[in-house]
Amino acid sequence: MRGSMSTELRGSERCPTLRRVPSATGAESGEDAIRQAHEQGDLRGAMDQAVRLYGPELLGYMTTLLRSEDWARDVFAKLLEDLWKGFEGFEWRSSFRTWAYRSARNAVYRARTRDRRPARLDTADMAALQAPEKSTTLPHLRTENKEWLAELRESLDPDEQTLLTLRIDRRMAWSDVALVLLGEEAEADPSRAAATVRKRFDRLKKRLRDAATERADQA
């Protein structure tokens, strides 16, 4: 991610700027710091910490779903506005991270419905699904594998991609994945919602495994 991004709000306030930072560690302590600042009324400080901690991964998630870095940056800028506007009334019924992913998912859906820009998938987005390649693999076979994985990812709908991203890449708990994907349904019955998304995940894994097996048999 290059450069920085900031969003103007009403009056003279600004939503915190997203800067390039190393991958966050100690997310739990980060959440505690965000919540403490929020409860003390330091909304700007709390949001600044949140954007530093989660901004890069949220932008990466949105880029994967929209398949366009430029488009994702535009939608991400709007997401920052939405998070800032809703932050004062945030009730901490989930972690900030889960709330932010839920908001990001909704922002992507609105953008896809409203803008309908041509989608282009970068094969690099499939890295998380691709098993490590042996050094003996011929270059043309590695390219073919990446192209096939890109086509496979292309066939998944946004919620399936979200499910893979949150559970595999972000290592979210099933309850948090359910909150992102199911919203109010998950709030009403967390256990049932978590079981629902887990079953979806198992079915999706089987589809991907079967597709990989079929490809191997045809090779």
Image: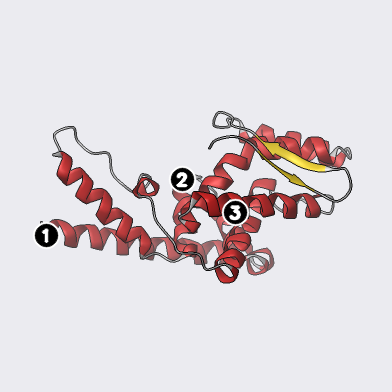
Residue 75 lies in what quarter of the image?
bottom right
Callout 3: few (<14), some (14-19), or many (20+) C-alpha neighbours within 10 Å? many
Per the model, the C-alpha gap separating discs 1 and 2 is 28 Å
Quick check: marks 2 and 3 in contact, CB under 8 Å?
no
First in sequence: mark 1 or mark 3?
A: 3
First in sequence: mark 1 or mark 2?
A: 2
First in sequence: mark 2 or mark 3?
A: 2
**Mark 2: amino acid:** Asp
- Judge left or right: residue 136 versus residue 184: left
Q: Residue at x 80, y 42 (%)?
A: 14
**Mark 3: amino acid:** Asp
* Residue where numbered disc 1 is placed: 217
What is the x, y in percent for residue 79?
A: 67, 53
Whether residue 68 is visible, yes or no, is yes
* Residue where numbered disc 2 is placed: 169
- Judge left or right: residue 100 versus residue 119: right
Numbered circle sitting on residue 176: 3
**Mark 1: amino acid:** Asp
